[in-house]
């Protein structure tokens, strides 16, 4: 197989999701999805918030910012960066969020995998800049880092809820 950076990046995005899913599954099975914690006066987001947030950010970063066809997510503003986390009663249904979580991911994987490698050096379509970079490649790499960071948060939530992660 000839090296294809787009295929490699899409594979890393997909592998990253496997860790996220394994941690989310533990929290769902233990009925801990909505548990909130405050440490030293700082609020930690719930696992539910993280799942919905990852749908919104993956939609923005991996579809909208790379020239893909993003989904319309009805609850996007509730779970975007800087949003005030809703109470469990204000949250959309778990089935709806889980469905969009999976749909956005599958669509993003397919889209990134099928990009022409020459597109990776182009400026992203939303003007998103992180660490001084604005290319399609940098947005994809940021999306990978972003989900890995939130997987770490999910791991902490597992530990705080008394769940084993290894």
Image: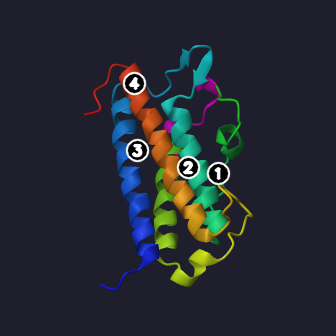
Q: Read off the residue under disc 4.
A: 31
Query: Which residues are drawn in magenta?
Result: 87-96
Residue 156 numbered tag: none
The 10 Å Cα crowd at callout 3, few under 14, some 14 to 19, many 20 or more, is many
- Labels 2 and 1: the sequence-earlier one: 2
Q: Secondary structure at mark 4?
A: loop
Label 2 or label 3, whichever lies nearer to me, is 3
Residue named by callout 2: 55
Residue at image location 44% in from the left, 41% down from the top: 151
* N-terminal label among 1 and 3: 3
Which of the colour schemes (rainbow, by chain, secondary structure, one colour) is used? rainbow
Q: Which mark is nearer the camera, 2 or 4?
A: 2
Q: Residue at x 55, y 63 (%)?
A: 140
Tag 2 near tag 1, CB within 8 Å: yes
Q: On the image, which quarter does residue 5 sit in? A: bottom left
Structural crowding at the residue carrying mark 2, measured as other residues with C-alpha within 10 Å and reported as few (<14), some (14–19) or many (≥20): many
Pick the front one: 157 or 41: 41
Task: Pick the quarter of the image with the C terminus.
Answer: top left
The residue under label 3 is 20
Label whose residue precedes the other's in the sequence (4 or 3): 3
User: In the rendered structure, are the residues bearing label 2 and label 3 in contact, judged by CB atoms less than 8 Å apart?
Assistant: no
């Amino acid at each position: 197989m000839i090296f294809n950076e787009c295929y490699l990046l899409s594979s890393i995005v997909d592998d990253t999701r496997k860790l996220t899913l394994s941690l989310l599954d533990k929290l769902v099975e233990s009925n801990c999805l909505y548990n909130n914690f405050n440490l030293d006066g700082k609020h930690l987001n719930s696992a539910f918030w993280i799942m919905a947030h990852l749908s919104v950010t993956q939609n923005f970063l991996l579809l909208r910012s790379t020239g893909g066809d993003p989904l319309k997510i009805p609850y996007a503003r509730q779970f975007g960066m800087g949003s005030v986390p809703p109470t469990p009663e204000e949250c959309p249904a778990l089935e709806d969020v889980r469905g969009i979580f999976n749909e956005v991911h599958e669509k993003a994987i397919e889209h990134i995998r099928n990009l022409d490698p020459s597109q990776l050096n182009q400026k992203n379509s939303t003007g998103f800049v992180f660490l001084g970079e604005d290319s399609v490649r940098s947005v994809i790499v940021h999306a990978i880092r972003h989900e890995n960071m939130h997987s770490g948060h999910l791991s902490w939530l597992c530990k705080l809820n008394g769940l084993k992660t290894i």
